[in-house]
Amino acid sequence: MDVTNSPGLYPLHRCKTLHLVRHAQGIHNVAGEKDYDAYSSEEFFDAHLTPLGWQQVDNLRKHVHETGLSKKIDLVIVSPLLRTMQTAVGVFGGEGYKDGIDVPPLMVADVGESHRPSISSLNCPPFVAVELCRELLGVHPCDRRKSISEYLPLFPAIDFSLIESDEDILWEANTREKKEEVAVRGMKFLNWLWTRKEKEIAIATHSGFLYHTLSAFGSDCHPSVKSEICKHFANCELRSVVIVDRSMMGSDPATTNYPGKIPSGLDLPSDVADEKLSEEGVAK
């Protein structure tokens, strides 16, 4: 049977919905498109968003609220770089922060030349920073992060506890991570998601990470579906996908399944009765 022409069916509790977001336009994107060598410039170390990038954030935020997506998301995972954290809190964070409210803001005012007021953590999902979904590591200063101790006062309500090293020990000045290594890291990240109980997860990450991770998928689909999954992301593009636990990695219970037969009673289906009768006839 041609698997590309047949639907797939999986238990709901073995699925998670991922809302994948590439960060909005950063200053390195603008400089790098004009001159590739700019990606190697320290001027763009841990690049922040451009004013155009913040407009992209505002438009995506409007979209996730108009579609109701903002009310469905259980968790926001973010790559611990300035541009991805700015994008994540701008899109999925609360409304403008107000003094006197006893909760830490997701982002304090004017982080990374944003000229933005503080962003509240009220009425929004938790935010967790994860190193596994960073951009290709090494060589390009724009992909090197600041220390976590520098980020903490800027993004007080983002949870950085899963990051083991304060300094960026993953980025190497003279070695660029290979595409195959990014794909392996991406699969490790997706497998890690099955340790989380949340079912709808937004992930703010990077073009290269998304492209090389998703390229491993879709070979069992129609070519147009494969293309839809694997094409490069635009700045601040959001794509929603479903991942399926086909190897029992997760342990989430089925919350909507119902066992039936309560109270118990006779319920032999006719097709099972037919099979039993046929088997008895063969046995004779």
Image (cartoon, helix red, strand yellow):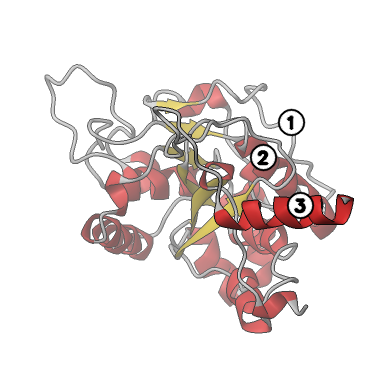
Q: Secondary structure at mark 1?
A: loop
Name the residue tied to disc 2: 132
Name the residue tied to disc 1: 169
Dot 1 alpha-carbon crowd within 10 angstroms: few under 14, some 14 to 19, many 20 or more: few
Quadrant of res 124 = top left
Residue at the spot x=68%, y=32% of the render?
168
Q: Secondary structure at mark 3?
A: helix
Which is more toward the observer, 176 or 270?
Answer: 270
Q: Amino acid at mark 2?
A: Leu
First of labels 2, 3 by sequence position: 2
Name the residue tied to disc 3: 182
Q: In the rendered view, does 70 fall on the left or right side of 235?
A: left
Q: Amino acid at mark 1?
A: Ile
Above or below residue 119? Residue 101 is above
Q: Amino acid at mark 3?
A: Val
Dot 2 alpha-carbon crowd within 10 angstroms: few under 14, some 14 to 19, many 20 or more: many
Quadrant of res 119 = top left
Q: Position of residue 49 (x, y in %)?
A: 42, 55
Which label number is shown at residue 113? none
Q: Secondary structure at mark 2?
A: helix
Which is more toward the observer, 273 or 213?
Answer: 273
Q: Is residue 1 visible?
A: yes
